[in-house]
Amino acid sequence: MEYLTHNERETMPTKTIVDCSTGITTEVELTAEEIAEREAMAAEYAAQQAAEEAAKAAAAAAKASAQSKLAELGLTADEIAALSK
C-alpha cells in the first residue's frame, strides 16, 4: 500500500463544491478523469494561443513587407501611413 506524504497531498488538484441550500463548502480531490480533462483543456488553450500569436506575427510581417514595397515604389512614410488607415 502506498501512502502520500503531507506535501504530496497538498499538491493534488482539488475542486470546491458549495451546497447553496446549506452553505456547506467541501473541497474534494479531482478524479483521474477530471485531471485528464483539465490537462487536455490546458493543452487546447495553449495551442489556440500559439495559433493566435502566429497569425498576429504573420499579419505584422505582411504589413511590414507591404510598407517596404510601397517605400521602394517611392511613397513617403506619410503617404504609406495614410494608406494604412
Image (cartoon, grey):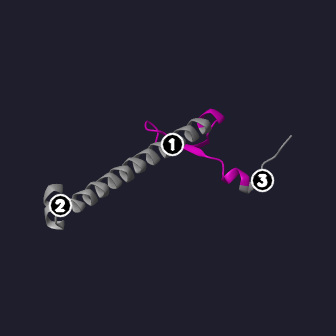
Circle 1 residue: 24
Choose between 75 and 3: the one closer to the eye.
75
Q: CA distance from mark 3 to mark 2?
A: 65 Å
Which of pointers 3 and 1 indicates the residue nearer the eye? 3
| Crowding near the residue tagged with mark 1, few <14, some 14–19, many ≥20 C-alpha atoms within 10 Å | few
Residue 33, compared with residue 13, is above or below; it is above
Please name the residue shown 24% across and 61% down the image: 72
Quadrant where the image shows the C terminus: bottom left
Circle 2 residue: 80
Checking the image for residue 5, the label placed there is 3
Tag 3's secondary structure? loop
Please name the residue shown 26% across and 57% down the image: 69
| Crowding near the residue tagged with mark 2, few <14, some 14–19, many ≥20 C-alpha atoms within 10 Å | some
Tag 2's secondary structure? helix
Please name the residue shown 61% across and 36% down the image: 36
Residue 58 at least partly seen: yes
Who comes first in sequence, dot 3 or dot 2? 3
In the displayed image of the protein, which residue is found farthest to the front? 73
What are the residue bounds of the magenta stretch?
A: 8-34
Residue 65 shown left or right of residue 29 in the figure:
left
Picture coordinates of residue 82, whole percent (x, y): 13, 60
Q: Amino acid at mark 2?
A: Ile
Residue 85 at least partly seen: no
Who comes first in sequence, dot 2 or dot 1? 1
Picture coordinates of residue 51, whole percent (x, y): 44, 44
Q: CA distance from mark 3 to mark 1?
A: 27 Å
Who comes first in sequence, dot 3 or dot 1? 3
Picture coordinates of residue 84, whole percent (x, y): 18, 56
Residue 22 shown left or right of residue 28 in the figure:
left
| Crowding near the residue tagged with mark 3, few <14, some 14–19, many ≥20 C-alpha atoms within 10 Å | few
**How many numbered marks does the figure carry?**
3
